[in-house]
Image: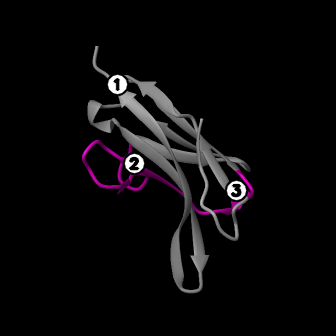
Amino acid sequence: MNIRKVEGVQSQVVLTQPESEMGFPGSSLTLKCACSGFSVGSAYMHWIRQAPGKGLEWIIYYYSEFWASKDSSNLYLHMTQLKTEDTAVYYCARETVSGDTAGLYNNCSSTSHTEGH
């Protein structure tokens, strides 16, 4: 498992994802982000990905094939009709607000591979 934790006042907040998941073109895949130190149900959460050689991309708003759900301690990214261009490192992140500034507090990565037959 790959765990990254931001040190600071809220250092008990941890988001954990499996190191790697595999999907195939045309198939479905669900990524899970296990969270501790806070309630996912009351937090603004995001899914972000980074394809090889590309910048970060907030994906949940732009792809109808992707949708997210959450319960009290987990965030899920559900993906259908996978394509080879969906190969990327996927991040879950928790939003924080400090004064008038919003930002991302913590993230972890999970690599999703898509392969042709």
**What's the residue at 33%, 35% (across, down)?**
87
Visible in this render: residue 51?
A: yes
Q: Give the camera-side residue of 9 and 67.
A: 9
Can you name the residue that lies furthest to the front here?
7
Q: Residue flagged by tag 3: what amino acid is it?
A: Gly
Does residue 86 appear to the left or right of 8 in the view shown? left
Residue at label 3?
41
Q: Is residue 26 above or below residue 14?
A: above
> In the shown orientation, is residue 46 left or right of residue 62?
right
Q: Nearer the viewer, mark 2 or mark 3?
A: 2
Residue 80 in view: no
- Would you say 84 lies left or right of 34 here? left
Q: On the image, numbered disc 1 is attached to which residue?
A: 26
Residue type of the residue flagged with mark 1? Gly
Circles 3 and 1 in contact, beta carbons < 8 Å: no
Q: Which residue, given by chain and number where applicable, does mark 2 sit on?
A: 49
Near mark 3 (Cα within 10 A), the count class, few <14, some 14-19 or many ≥20, is some
Q: Which residues are magenta?
A: 36-64
Asked which secondary structure carries label 1, the reply is: loop
Locate residue 40: give its quadrant: bottom right
Residue 90 location, x and y as percent?
Answer: 44, 44
Local secondary structure at mark 3: helix
